[in-house]
Amino acid sequence: MRILADGLRFSLVGAAQVAIDSMTYIVLTQFGLETGIANVCARCAGAMLGFWLNGVVTFCRDGQPRLRMRLARYLILWTVLTFASTVSLIEIAASNGLASTWWCKPLIEITLGVGSFILSRHWVYRRRPMRSSPQLLLLDPDQQIRHSGQAAKQTCTWRRSVRRAGHERNGRRSGS
């Protein structure tokens, strides 16, 4: 049930992130900054905390890609979600006024957080893909992608034993 534990930790980190993001947004818009610029600045403040906490607390595992790879993936995800959030807030401000965006901002961020969890868990902070080894070359490319860890070792061992049995049937020894 690792997904439930990840989800709980992500929710706690996300709550802190949304609080900082929303408070920063409200303060910046009260000082007269435009909705779009204020949202990007507020999301930057929340993103710094969120990237660090999710990497250290929520999705901390062995075999994660290096920081640069995670950061690049995170920035791509953050840019797409920030665009969606900013467009939504600009539309709300245009139709209902600035004060209504202060109440909608946390709701928008929580809604985007669901998609963010799935993409963060399976793409941004995912484990490192397996590297090709001579044993894995026995598997076709689709199987290399699907298998990991012990399952791949068992499959490779099975494939080698099948090949040995075939060589022995053809009159060749397995070591020759």
Image: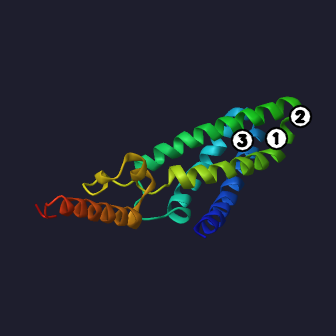
Question: What residue lies at 67% left-to-right and 34% top-to-bottom?
Answer: 37
> The N terminus lies in which quarter of the figure?
bottom right
User: Looking at the picture, how far across and down is residue 74, in whole percent?
Assistant: 53, 46
Question: What residue lies at 65% left-to-right and 39% top-to-bottom?
Answer: 82
Locate residue 132 relative to residue 31 in the image: left or right. left
| Residue 101 circle label | 1
Q: Residues within 10 Å of mark 2 (few under 14, many from 20)?
A: few
Q: Which residue is mark 3?
A: 28
Considering depth in this image, is 28 or 49 the residue closer to the camera? 49
Question: Label 1's element?
Answer: helix
Q: Residues within 10 Å of mark 3 (few under 14, many from 20)?
A: some
Extreme residue toward the left, this view: 176
Question: Based on the displayed image, in which of its 4 quarters is residue 165 positioned?
Answer: bottom left
Label 3 vs label 1: CA separation?
12 Å
Q: Earlier in the sequence, mark 2 or mark 1?
A: 2
Locate residue 107 relative to residue 24 in the image: left or right. right
Considering depth in this image, is 103 or 164 the residue closer to the camera? 164
Q: Which residue is mark 2?
A: 96
**85 in relation to 143, above or below:** above
